[in-house]
């Protein structure tokens, strides 16, 4: 198999996501940071054992070495599980351990890859693990092979230019500010991010996958808030999602001039309900019947 520097993940809907793989050098630098942290902890513990060295030097030295490997494993297991595949060193270098299929890491995977770290470190400074990373297709050390994991780089993503993304686009939802407010209250940050990410990457999707993806996202947001038929007629699912993103990320944007022939009649809403929709906080909205503040696995 030829070596690659990119991890490709294809979803059941035919959408392909890519993640750049971390190389041996960046992984080694992350390990040096983590090793320095563990060394400091060991040094503090060593001070407490210093007096015992006078009584049983060889025993304490062996205990010191075993303590290093034990704390190193516990440190890596704890943080990789708690921080979703990251330690201090990996976070500084923007690296993350992930499952090779793009699935969530299991605790058993974290334990296996870190217990086999002892083998990868042989004979010194990760020589065995380094050779495995250089020669393997996905830059995996032995622990990664056993745990079915890889280490990826987290690229720095530029903030999308919403003004350019929405430039000149008419938002039919703007005529219903009370429903827009309700939509913002019932949408979590993760849900809004999925819709925005889909718009940013839409041109990279296959045509059929693009249609299916926006149909699913549009259906998800239509279930949250029912806008009048006048606001949704004659627009595609992708246009509807674009209008939703515009309403979520640019709430104070003045509506564009209404095209001729397009009615923007705001249905009456009770005074108390209207005030709640316009002034309620997102936290308060979570108590409204039928709201969804959790992050869905799939829209």
Image (cartoon, rainbow, N blue to C red):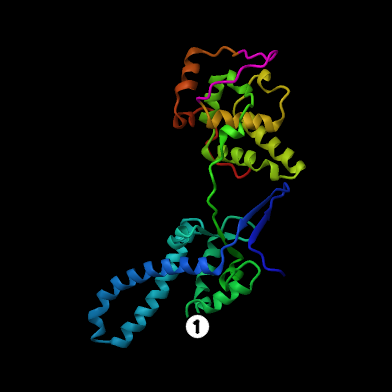
Q: Residue at x 58, y 77 (%)?
A: 131
Is label 1 in a helix, a strand or a loop? loop
By secondary structure, the bulk of the magenta-drawn segment is best described as loop
Q: Is residue 48 above or below residue 152?
A: below
Q: Is residue 102 above or below residue 138?
A: above
Quarter of the figure with residue 149: bottom right
Q: Is residue 256 magenta?
A: yes
Q: Quadrant of the C terminus?
A: top right
Q: Residue at x 43, y 60 (%)?
A: 88
Q: Position of residue 19 (x, y in %)?
A: 61, 56
Q: Is residue 101 above or below residue 147?
A: above
Q: How many marks?
A: 1
What is the span of residues highlighted in magenta in the rendered image? 252-265
Q: Using residue 207 as the reference point, say whether residue 273 is left or right of it.
A: left
Which is nearer the eye, 50 or 140?
140
Quarter of the figure with residue 139: bottom right
Q: Position of residue 268 (x, y in %)?
A: 57, 12
Q: Residue at x 64, y 38 (%)?
A: 199
Which is nearer the eye, 187 or 256?
256
Q: Residue at x 71, y 69 (%)?
A: 2
Q: Is residue 72 magenta?
A: no
Quarter of the figure with residue 6: bottom right
Q: Residues within 10 Å of mark 1 (few under 14, many from 20)?
A: few
Q: Badge 1 is on which residue?
A: 123
Q: Quadrant of the N terminus?
A: bottom right
């Amino acid at each position: 198999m030829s070596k690659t520097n990119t991890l490709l993940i294809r979803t059941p809907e035919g959408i392909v996501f890519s993640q750049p793989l971390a190389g041996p050098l960046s992984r080694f630098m992350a390990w040096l940071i983590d090793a320095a942290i563990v060394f400091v902890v060991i040094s503090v513990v060593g001070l407490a054992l210093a007096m015992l060295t006078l009584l049983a030097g060889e025993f304490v030295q062996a205990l010191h070495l075993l303590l290093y490997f034990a704390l190193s494993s516990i440190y890596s297991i704890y943080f990789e599980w708690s921080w979703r595949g990251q330690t201090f060193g990996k976070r500084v270098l923007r690296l993350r351990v992930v499952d090779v299929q793009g699935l969530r890491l299991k605790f058993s995977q974290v334990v296996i890859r870190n217990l086999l770290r002892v083998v990868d470190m042989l004979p010194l400074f990760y020589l065995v693990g380094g050779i495995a990373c250089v020669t393997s297709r996905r830059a995996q050390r032995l622990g990664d092979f056993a745990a079915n994991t890889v280490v990826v780089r987290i690229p720095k993503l530029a903030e999308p230019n919403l003004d350019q993304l929405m430039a000149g686009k008419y938002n039919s939802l703007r005529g219903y500010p009370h429903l827009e407010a309700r939509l913002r209250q019932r949408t979590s940050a993760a849900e809004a991010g999925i819709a925005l990410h889909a718009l940013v990457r839409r041109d990279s999707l296959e045509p059929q996958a693009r249609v299916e993806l926006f149909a699913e996202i549009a259906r998800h947001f239509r279930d949250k808030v029912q806008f009048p038929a006048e606001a949704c007629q004659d627009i595609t699912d992708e246009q509807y999602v674009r209008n939703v993103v515009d309403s979520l990320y640019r709430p104070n944007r003045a509506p564009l001039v209404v095209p001729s022939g397009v009615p923007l009649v705001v249905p009456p809403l009770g005074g108390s309900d209207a005030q709640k929709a316009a002034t309620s906080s997102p936290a308060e909205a979570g108590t409204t019947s039928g709201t969804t503040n959790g992050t869905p696995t799939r829209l």
